[in-house]
Amino acid sequence: MPVNNLKFTQARALLHPGSWHLSTRLVAIMLALLTVICALVGLVSYTTLSVTVNNQLDSSLQQAAVRTTAFYTGSGQSPNGALPDPLNARATSAGQLSAVLSNGVVHYAGILSGSGTRQQLTTADADILAGLSTNGDLSTKRLSLGEYRLQAQAVPNGDILITGLPLAATQQTLNTLVLSIVLVSLAGLMVLGWAGTVIIRRNMRPLAQLSDTATKVATLRLDAGEVALSARVPENAARPGTEVGNVGNAFNAMLENVSHALEARQRSETKLRRFVADASHELRTPLTAIRGYAELLSMTEPLSTDGQTSLSRVQDQSVRMSRLVEDLLTLARLDEAQQGPKGVAAQKHGAPAAPVNMSPLVMEAVNDIQMVNDDHQWSFTVPDEPVDVSCDDTSLRQVLLNLLANAAKHTPAGTTVHTSLSQTADGTCVLDVSDNGPGIDPAFQEVIFDRFSRADQARTATAGSTGLGLSIVQGLVRSHGGTVTVTSAPGHTTFTVRLPGVFHRGAPSETPGARNGNSSIS
């Protein structure tokens, strides 16, 4: 997958909380709740402080208006007939605004600066002041020097006295509160997020241990063979009393039950294999006797035509039964790894089997099979150089003959069957048996190597198939450390056997210097 697509997929996963880890979701939910709480606390605090400082400002403004009115109306006119400047009133604070509106004209409009000097207002400010309501209500207006809380009220001489206080200090107080709340909330969320992550992960650790145990069990092969199901949830994660502990304890109990079931299955399979091996072994003697007496009877006793036919049927069925018994014995020996092929036994005791050149075996097997199946076209391709494998020739010959016989049985007359042998660069021996028959049903390919598996409807087959040939091939190949696979489509089916080989430097592959043979009989 390209890097850009991978990043895009990861980004999309981050936008879907359902794909997050449980611990991540818990931390995110906790932080979201804390964020909401911090926002509510900040909103309530801001609202409370805003109402408080605004009320204090309004109270200070009303007191300043009373002092200014008393000074303006009680001082009288100056010798030149001018009224006193309201800014000269006692206890006038820095930033206070005073103005007189007389006959629609603003006089004495100014603000007392922090140094005690007078700051004149602009014409635009005077227009704003002239438009104030004169009923004594408080209002907020933005002037050239900032926002001001203003009050305009009539005095006895008919003038309108305007008094105002700046909102800068109040706004600064509120802004400081907002900044403090944001910084404290962010710091608190970071600390609580880190602490919550540590605590949640520590409490989620039993679930992780449970997941690890389940993963180990999921990777075990439980379908066949002896299985040592020793994986268990640790004791600290399986203590009843908590939700996670109850799950861990139940999971351990389930594993104990499964372990006992697997042991019972293994004992049953062992008994069944021993029974099959013993029964097959015991059947060899009477079957040999039946075949011997049938042959003796056919050679020494005069029989009618019907009698000869019946006796021939007995001989054919005894031969078929003998082959079935031998196949069952081979599978039983492979299962128990006791009296298996020489290669298996040798490897079991630490001595590797002598290398065997597969090229002559392939040619001999193809020549042998074509002698009894002359209605097929047989061919082979083998390299000039030896293709050695550490297996015994008996097992290899049986693998070859079973694969070739399978192709002969399950394909119609006239089918071409080609056997090719090659060696890869790492020394692996590759054997392919291909045919151009009708192919194998895809559903049957999944169970084609199972014992007694037959799907005559998938290929044109003849009678007499026991469904053990490919199982024996798989068992023999696996016992020598190899693999066998099948690929099939209408018109082309290939069984591929891979065996660890004895690599020769400079050994050519199949194509250069290969020997081709056509063993068809016309």
Image (cartoon, rainbow, N blue to C red):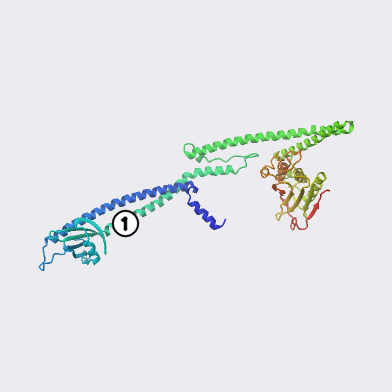
Instruction: Give the quarter of the image for residue 102.
Output: bottom left
Q: Is residue 405 left or right of residue 262?
A: right
> What is the tally of numbered marks visible in this picture?
1
Regarding residue 357, the answer to whether it shows in the image is no
> What kind of residue is marked 1?
Thr
Q: Which residue is mark 1?
A: 176
Viewer-nearest residue: 199 or 400: 400
Viewer-nearest residue: 402 or 351: 402
Identity of the residue drawn at 38% across and 51% down = 188
| Helix, strand or loop for disc 1 | helix
- Where is residue 295 drawn, in percent x and y? 85, 34
- Where is residue 122 drawn, in percent x and y? 24, 67
Identity of the residue drawn at 79% across and 55% down = 515
Identity of the residue drawn at 49% across and 44% down = 205
- Where is residue 420 drawn, in percent x and y? 75, 51
Look at the picture and state if 209 lies above or below 107: above
* Neighbour tally class for label 1: few under 14, some 14-19, many 20 plus, Cα within 10 Å: few
Regarding residue 284, the answer to whether it shows in the image is yes
Name the outermost residue toward the left: 79
Identity of the residue drawn at 81% across and 48% down = 367
Viewer-nearest residue: 179 or 506: 179
Q: Is residue 488 left or right of residue 66?
A: right
